[in-house]
Amino acid sequence: MKALRETEVMVIGGGPAGLSAAVEAASFGCDVTLVDSDLALGGQLIKQTHKFFGSRDERAGTRGFKISELLMDELSERRDSVTAYTNCTATGYYPEDGVLSCVKGEDEYFKVKPHKIVMATGAQERLIPFPNNHLPGVYGAGAVQTLMNVYGVKPGDRVLMVGAGNIGLIVSYQLLQAGVEVAGIVEALDKVGGYWVHAAKVRRLGVPIYLRHTVVEALGEQYVTGAVIQEIDERFQPVGEGKALDVDIICMAVGLTPTCELLWQAGCEMIFVPELCGYVAQRDKNMRTSHPDIWVAGDAAGIEEASSAMVEGRIAGVNVAKSLGHGSSAEHEKRLAEYRRRLDDLRGGEVGEKICKGIACCTVDRWEV
Amino acid sequence: MKLIEEHPILDFKHGRRVTFSFDGKQLEGYEGEPIAAALHANGVKVYRETPIRHQPRGFFCAIGKCSSCFMVVDGVPNVRTCVTPLEAGMHVETQRGKGVVPLDPEEEGR
């Protein structure tokens, strides 16, 4: 499979943003190729057992994995226009000739020359340094969710959760649903970062949340057999003695950072935005980057959540279709106005303040022609 | 196997149950699911040993990015077992060090 494949639109990533971009572009008649490195499409949505917040337009009140099924239904309606490859990683972008290299599985290599690209590569997890953090049993929260919620495998018997943001709280609750004990949640800050409703659910089930605490060591020789947690002060310096917990899993939920290697390779103008958790591509309000043929959507454009990722994907999808001359401008404008309204709704209120501040830092009014 | 038997929300649909070998031992897992998930369900946590300090590594990111779960599968090293589907009769081995990539017989003849 060495031949150069051609496609009008290449969508990289089949999570909420990428699937939305693909079906939206396809709805205007674009020929779309989508690649996702996982074995199944749906990104992180397929692992979410909780009902979403956000707005009714983005399926608030529906469980995450059900939202993914709805997107898959939409994709199957567009199967004549969208070719989707799973277990397929986009490994490089070569800006000189606009070619993407992809590897399907471990050994099938091919190249694609797309006219337009939507980068919906999502995010990757952060890790914090502590002795023995390399031991098997120290897992990312996403990995724990994959094991238990996609494949039905118990990750362990007793878990220490590191981080009380939404992911740490939600995954703790999911562990309890799966019949796994959660010994406690440590949070370095003096308050719970996630929504109160998630914190209340785990507290009601008897899981202690240790504020101003962190993990300082994983115990074990071949794999985790325990963890030492430690109280810290406001300068993150240790206070008193550490406390050993009998756990076999240390689950890291200490944040995500946008996956942006391909954007760097493409030469897109990048900017570090703390509110969006890392380097992100500068974009206009249509989600176009400084590269005229590349759009970005979802967590790759800044860490937020699945509801806004889906809307960003749709905005990118409409604009890609527009740039290729598919669809009428009346239809483009109608849909864009609707999607922008939905994004504004999602980002309204106190919770959206930080995100809006971050987005203001990386959004340009227009690109110089 | 360490499988979730009852779940209040999710209903797990596993594929065909198949046999594979891990360091010579016969284990069972579900076809099409990641090799790493099948091993974890069998209580296997150490997947490779690092080249210099000989430290254990296992499952970590589960999205094919971090290199932690590299193993030798059917003689090929550095296989990302978290995203490689299990097949019946696979030979899965703990990877020690960097592994040696077997040469393609055609290329070898050149």
Image (cartoon, rainbow, N blue to C red):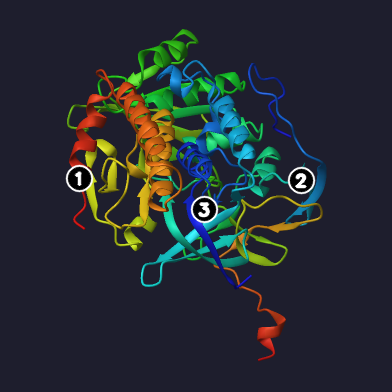
Mark 1–mark 3 CB contact (< 8 Å): no
Q: Looking at the image, is A210 positioned above or below residue B96?
A: above
**Residue A318, located in which quarter of the rendered image?**
top left
* Nearer-the-camera pick, B44 or B78: B78
- Closer mark to the observer between disc 1 and disc 3: 1
Residues marked 1 and 3, same chain: no
Residue B105 picture location, percent across and down: 72, 82
Circle 2: element type = loop
* Three-letter residue code for mark 2: Glu
Circle 3: element type = loop
* Nearer-the-camera pick, A271 or A296: A296
* Label 3 chain ID: B
Label 1 sits on residue: A364
Label 2 sits on residue: B31
Circle 1: element type = loop
Q: Give me the disc on residue B68.
A: 3
> For mark 3, does the 10 Å Cα neighbourhood hold few (<14), some (14 to 19), or many (20 or more) residues?
many
Residue A276 picture location, percent across and down: 28, 38
